[in-house]
Amino acid sequence: MNEQYFQFRNITPEEAAQAAAIEQICFPPNEACSETMMRNVAETAPELFLVAVDRRTEKIAGMLYGLATEENSFRDEFFINAGLHNPAGKNVMILGLDVLPQYRGQRLARKIMSKYLRREQERGRERIILTCVEGKVGMYERMGFQNQGLAASSWGGEQWYEMSYTV
């Protein structure tokens, strides 16, 4: 991946609709974050929303977003209630990692995650927690996450694995 083609930064409120559209492309309808929730997260926790903007098109190519909390395990309510965000929280619950299809295979997801983890470490976070389907466990393990086994989450009617990264 040629990093010079991308700008990595927090989301702006004006980009929430674009982010929601990307989510609809990257996730099945039963798993995707709603546009309303995407707007709420972008407004409530823009500092926990990292976008990779293609410098050539000035559009979002990929993104990672979450909410900070004192909680230690993932629950489905994080996907529907941005009010659970606690800016001083020691942990971050990742709600989504999205890379548009035309940018896949360039290690962009890994670069976004790497920048995100480094940034949250600098902010003094303790753990980054996410859930993923079985087919993505290996990808997140290669990014340094540990598989904690089956998650309590049943979001979208799926079986999820909880993954954690100690910062």
Image (cartoon, rainbow, N blue to C red):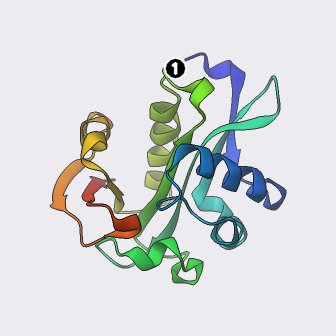
Q: Nearer the viewer, residue 143 or 99?
A: 99
Establish if 89 lies above or below 161: below
> Residue 44 at x, y = what percent?
67, 73
What residue is drawn where x is 69% and y is 45%?
Answer: 9
Direction from residue 83 to residue 43 in the image, left or right: right
Establish if 106 lies above or below 40: above
Residue type at mark 1 is: Gln
Q: Nearer the viewer, residue 27 or 80?
A: 27
Q: Looking at the image, how many numbered discs can be counted on the residues? A: 1
Q: Which residue is mark 1?
A: 106
| Outermost residue toward the top in this view | 2
What residue is drawn where x is 72% and y is 53%?
Answer: 11
| Outermost residue toward the bottom in this view | 83
| Outermost residue toward the left in this view | 149
Establish if 127 lies above or below 100: below
> Residue 148 at x, y = what percent?
17, 58
Direction from residue 127 to residue 36 in the image, left or right: right
Task: Report helix, strand or loop for mark 1.
Answer: loop
Q: Quadrant of the N terminus?
A: top right
Establish if 22 lies above or below 154: above
Picture quadrant where residue 58 is located: top right
Disc 1 crowd, CA 10 A, few/some/many (<14, 14-19, 20+): few
Picture quadrant where residue 162 is located: bottom left
Q: Nearer the viewer, residue 8 or 163?
A: 163
Q: Nearer the viewer, residue 102 or 158?
A: 158
> Residue 86 at x, y = what percent?
52, 79
Instruction: Evaluate whether residue 16 shows in this view.
Output: yes
> Residue 88 at x, y = what percent?
51, 76
Instruction: Evaluate whether residue 119 shows in this view.
Output: no
Picture quadrant where residue 5 is located: top right
